[in-house]
Amino acid sequence: MGIDFLTDESQITNHKPRITNHKPQITNHKSQFYKFTNDK
């Protein structure tokens, strides 16, 4: 069970950078949305 816990923890740490990478995309979509509303 201890080995499984270590592998699970490594997977969690690997997923963290993906979440932070998605953040700039969300902010980019917001800016595009504001541009779209401003163009109207």
Image: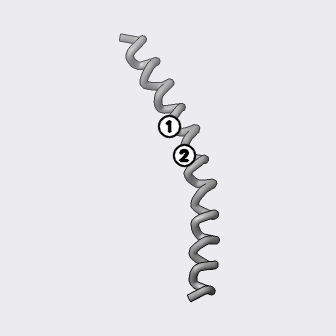
From the viewer's perspective, is residue 32 above or below residue 10? above
- Mark 2: secondary structure: helix
Tell me the quadrant of the picture where the N terminus can be found.
Answer: bottom right
Q: Nearer the viewer, residue 3 or 20?
A: 3
Check residue 26 in the rendering and tell me which mark sits there, or answer none.
1
Position in image of residue 3 (x %, y %): 62, 86
Position in image of residue 37 (x %, y %): 38, 16
Give the amino acid type for the residue marked by disc 2 in the picture.
His
Q: Residue at x 47, y 25 (%)?
A: 32
- Kindly identify which residue carries mark 2: 22
Quarter where residue 15 is shown: bottom right
Q: Residue at x 42, y 24 (%)?
A: 33
Quarter where residue 12 is shown: bottom right
Q: Nearer the viewer, residue 18 or 16?
A: 16
- Mark 1: secondary structure: helix
Position in image of residue 38 (x %, y %): 42, 11
Give the amino acid type for the residue marked by disc 1 in the picture.
Ile
